[in-house]
Structure formats: structure tokens, C-alpha cells
Image (cartoon, rainbow, N blue to C red):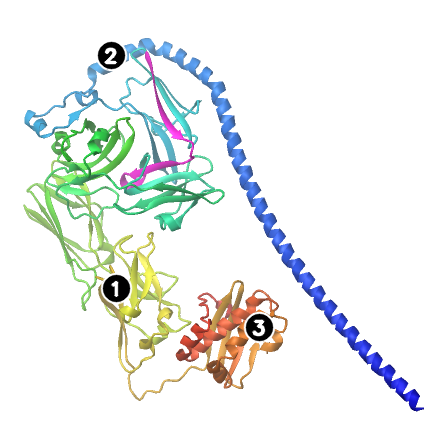
Amino acid sequence: MLILLVAVAAGVVACVVIYSWKRRQARNAAEQARRRAEEQRREAEQQALRRAEEEQKRREAEELEAAKEERRRLEEERRSLEEESRRKEEEAQRKAEEEGRRKAETERKRIEPAKKGGRPRGATQEREEQPAQEVQSRLKPEIVCWKRERQWVPAVEVPEDLPGNFGLVVLQNALPLTQDESREDCWRLEQACGQVVVRWSEDEVARETQIPLGEEDYLLFKLSGLKQNQGRRVKSTSSGSYLVMVPNNWVRDDVSSGPPPAAPEPVSLARYKAHFFDLEKDGDGEIAFRTPGNKPFVIKSKASRLELVGSRLNDASQDMGPLFGTGPPKIRALDDEVWKDIGAIVVGEEGSGIGRRWRTQFTPVSEGMEQNLPSEVAGRKGGWYFLRFYDTNDDLVESLDFRFICVLKEIRILPATPLPSEHGHGPACVEFLHEPGCAVEPADSFLCSIQIERRDDKTILTISPDPACDETCWLVGPEDGPQVEVAILVERLWWAVGEEDKAPSKWEDQLLALSRDDFAATSKKALWLKFPRLRWVDRVLVGFEKPKARHYSVKVTEKTIAIPLRDFGDAQEVGDHTQEHPFKVWIGGDDAASEGVIGVIPASPSEEEVVTPPSHWIGFGRKKTAVAEADLKHGSGDVKVNGRPIGNYFKETPPEAKRFLRRLLELEQVREVLLQMEVSLVVKGSSPTKARQVKAVAHALARALMSYDSKLKPSLKQAGFGGVRVTKARSMQRER
């Protein structure tokens, strides 16, 4: 019997052992299957990523091959049509020869001396002061662009004084171009590369000039004119505003070029866009793109070799060139070799309108650093003019704009500080010092009050403290001569407190009374600053003390900036109720920044006032697609995620992510706080089986702990739990 019992017991033990072994085997098999599935999933993701990259490369290669094929096709068409085009041109020239001879003779009899290159009319002594000599008008066409409605149009501009324009034909890559319907001297380009050929007949002789565009597939223009709405093609850059037409698949490199002054705009060329660049004088800016395949393409900026000197006046116009008083400026070379490279200089009246505007040209004298402009310019008493500098190959190498008013001596603007006094901004005084007979009139109607006092030798403006009158435009010039537009900028800073996503309609120059609630973590209030003009400053400092002030960058396309007040919620001054604290702004350079007090946080009405402590402390965290909110309050010490205990919710989380969360929970200071707190966490996005949710939860909890006790912030930061600010998490907020 004993033996039987022993045998039965041994059988039971064996069954238990076998059962346990089989369970272990099943668990191991399930774990291996899970690991294999995870590996397969990762491999599938990698394969999908590789396939996507290969597909992208294939598409780029197809686009490149299509572009090459298009060029080959155009080349074949050019070769096939070239002969036919030449035959048509010869026939047209033969038909026009007789009429051309007669008309050319008539035109030569009527042409003005300046257009023929002869000596212009004027006093002999005036010409002795101007050593430069006038030359024959330039016959070489140029590539220009202009903005029509909301589209930029590149075209070939044929000079108006091209003799007779008989049998005129404009080709690009052997294909005839279409003459623009609104600009009779322009033929619209069809491509951004290749070669432009202009053919015409002069004195029964066939003439031809060529403009190579190159094969780099871009066009570079320097902008000019009112509102910078036109430009001329240049080969390199120096300073000023530029427009570059590139294919749609080129990406502007903002790291190298800086932020764009304006968004890209459409171009009449198919599959091209126009990008804008502003290059500072003597700056290190450059024009940079990323071409397909992420290859860099850079147009380096060169320092300008020419400048205008004279009696320069205080004018705020940004797109019309500098303003000079008493007379036109001189051209100064910045090195000794400049004039050897300049073949001719064209000076002409700038602006838009119907009809041909005045212009002339001259060759510079190689000796000396400065060149006088032709005496005809000073004789016009004022106006807005352009200067174009051409090399010995008749290529445009530089262009400048300027304005001058012969009867205007000086413009004074007082006061000079942009920050108001404790009583706010006062009226600004602007004085135009001029000769008798000078008219100063507003260019348009103003929305604010401006008093005008007229005297023989000066005109005085008193401009009221109103943001609408910070920048005003005036027409100034002799009563019997041209009127020149002058911009007056009164540099004044304005501010207001409002919603961060909506600019205020009313601006202040008095101290703001700020509430501590405005600085709360959930506050949507912002301090708005309004500057006198675009690009007035590139950044500002805001805070209670300069060493702890925050830097905020100002967009080049904006005159205002919104600064969220919650960014300063953890400042010591916000929590101090015993005294008032001024809220300040600093503008200008870091070393010589101007300081102004914008608002004040008042002290508590009474020292005995009892401040009710908050009952909840909120924190947000994010890891990629996972966003978490932590709600910390006094309680039993429970920590729950989406209503479940934290350990249960993250039981399937990868071990590394669990260790990340455990490292936070096991910090001594954190553990002591959580023993007397109840934590409710809500997390959305991703999955609890991945590391994203647990890391988002850890950051949210860290942020809530910092809100509860700011003394925890250094240790949490040092441990790697800085948290992530989520400014738009309304969907995570819950009703309390």
C-alpha cells in the first residue's frame, strides 16, 4: 500500500512538473512570437520607408529626365525652325528695306542730340564742371520683369531708340517670342534658360544681338520702382531688394538666406515661382536654395563698389532710394579700379506712367574717385531718378535709385526717442528747411491731426501722438517744378494687452495695470507691441529685470508682435504680493538698449489679505504624437492614467520607457510630494504599448510638480524632466 501511495505521489509530482514545463514553454513561445511580430512590424516599417524613399528618388529622377527630354525637344525644334525663321526674316527685311530707308532718314533728321550721342544743349561752363562725356544711346536689349496683377512677367526689353525697329524679330532658343500687349517694347520670355536673339535691319544691313541666359535654370533681378514692382536682370548681387525666378521644386534655404521678406509669388513661366531677398549693404547675406536631390545652390553677395554722396536728408522711404537736398548727388567709387570696368552710365527719370521718360547717358572719367552727373539732371530741379552702370560688354553690373530736391536744405524730426515719458508720447515736430518758393503738401489725407505752419524759409509740422501718423507721405518741391514724394517717420513705440490671437484695435502709451491672473499658466493674454514700420527692430527683450528678460524675434513682414504673458508666470515678481513690480521692454542693441516701463503689477491691497492657494496644479507634456495632461491635487497618493492605476495602464510598455517613468517617481523630493497628493493623468495619441505615452505622462507630471512647488524645478530639470509646454491643448482641458 505504501508503495502504491509513493507511486501515486510520484506521478502527481511528475504531472505538476510536466504541466509547469509546458506552461513555461507556452509562455516562451508566446514571447518569441510577440518578438517576431514586433521585428516583422519594424522590418515592414523600414521596408515601407525605404520604398517611399526609392519612390521619391524615382519621381525626382523622372522629373529630371523629363526636363532633359524637354530641353532636347526644344533644341531639335530650334534647329528645325532656325532655317525657316531666317528665311522669313530675310523676306520681311527685303519688303521693309525701301520703307525703312525713307523712315530712317526722316528719324535721323528729327532725333535729339542727346539720343544721337551728341553734345547736349546747355551753357559751356556747366559742361566744364561735368568731365564725363555723353555717348551713343545703348542699343543692347535687356531682360526685365514687372508685376502685373498678382503675377511676375519676365521679358526682353528692346530700347525705344533702336533705329527704326524694321524687320524686328525676338527669338528665344530659335522660337519667336510674343510681344506684350501692354508694353510694346517688351517680348515675354517662355523659358528661364537658353539664349535670346534680337534681329533687326538698319541702313539695309541685318543686325543681331544675343543675350545668353545660361543653363542654370534661374533668373536674377534687382528690384526698383515704386513698391518694388519692377526689376532688371543682373549677374550678381550687392545690396538692395532682389527677385529670383526658380523652378517650383527648388526650396529656399532660410538657414543661409534668413527669413523671406515676403511669400513667393506666381510667375508667367510655367512651373516657376518668384522668391524675394533683401541684402544689406556690407552684409554677409546670400541667396540660397536647395535643388532636387537636396543640392545647395548659392548666389554670393558682393560688396557694392559704388555709392552716392551729397547732402543726404532725413527721409524714411525704403523703395525709392536716398533723398538729397540742394542738388543731385555725386557718384563715388570705393576702389581705384571701378571706372576702368564701367563702360557707360545711364541716368533717367524713374517712375511709372504712359509715355517715354527723360534719360541720358555718359561715360565716366577714369581719373578720380568721384563722378558728377550731367548738368541736365540739376537743371531739372528735382525728381526721382535711376542710375544704371554697364560694363564694357554692355552688361548691367549695378543700379541705384536716388531723389533730389534743389530747394530743400534739411529735414529735422523731434523728439528722437521712441519710448514715451511717464505722461505718454507728446506731439512730434518736423521742420523742412528750404528756400523761398518751396511747396510742402500732404500726399494723401490723414486720419489724425497734423498742424502745418508755413514760412518763407521753413515749413513746420506738428504731428499729434497717434499711431496712424507715425509714418506720413508728403510732396515737396519748387512751386514751379517737380514734386518729390518724401516719407516722414516719427519713431514711437505703442503697446496694449489683449488676446494673443487677435491684434488690438486701440494702442496705448501709458502704463498698463497688469493682473497676476494675466500671467497664469492657462492665460491667453498677451502683451502686444506696435513698431513704427517693418524691420524697425529684429528682436526685443521683455521682462522684469534685464538679466532675466526673454528675447523675442520680430518677423520681417510684421509691424506688431504678441508676447504671451504666461511665459513669465514662474517669475519671482509675479508671486510677490508685498510690492509692485514694473514690467519692462528693451529695444536696440544689447549693450545700448533703450529701456521702457510698459506696465506695473500692483501690490496686494492689504498685507493682511489672505491669498487662497490653488486647489489644482496642472501640467502638460508631449512626446511626438502623444499629449498628456496631469492634474495634481491634495489626496490619497493615488496616481491614475485614464482612470486606471499607473502600473496597470503601462504594464505592456517597453522596459526602457518604464525605467524613464520610474526614475521620476523614485526621486526623493517627488516621492515625498506624491505621498500626500492625488494625481489624475489623461493621455491621448499613440498607444500605452509604446514609449511615447509614458514619456508624455512623465513630462506632464514633472510640469505639474513644478507648478506646485517651483523649488522642484532645478532638480527635475537636472534629472531630464523639463516638461514640454503645450499652448494649444484645449481638447485636453477638463471642466472642474
Main secondary structure of the magenta stretch? strand
Residues at marks 2 and 3, CA–CA distance in whole angstroms? 95 Å
Query: Can you name the residue that lies furthest to the bottom here?
Result: 2
Nearer the viewer's eye, disc 1 or disc 2?
Answer: 1
293 relative position to 285: left or right: right
| Badge number at residue 586 | 1
Q: Quadrant of residue 126?
A: top left
Point out the tag, 2 or 3, that comes first from the N-terminus: 2
Q: Pointer 1: residues within 10 angstroms few (<14), some, or many (20+)? A: many
| Badge number at residue 15 | none
Residue beneath disc 3:
658
Q: Pointer 2: residues within 10 angstroms few (<14), some, or many (20+)? A: few
Read off the magenta span: 205-229
Residue beneath disc 2:
105
Asked if residue 226 is among those painted magenta in the image, a careful observer would answer: yes
Disc 1 element: strand
Report the front residue among 126 and 717: 717
Q: In which quarter of the image is residue 571?
A: bottom left
Disc 3 element: helix
Amino acid type of the residue tagged 3 in the rendering: Lys
Disc 2 element: helix
Q: Which residue is drawn at 31% across and 80% down?
A: 576
Residues at marks 1 and 3, CA–CA distance in whole angstroms? 45 Å
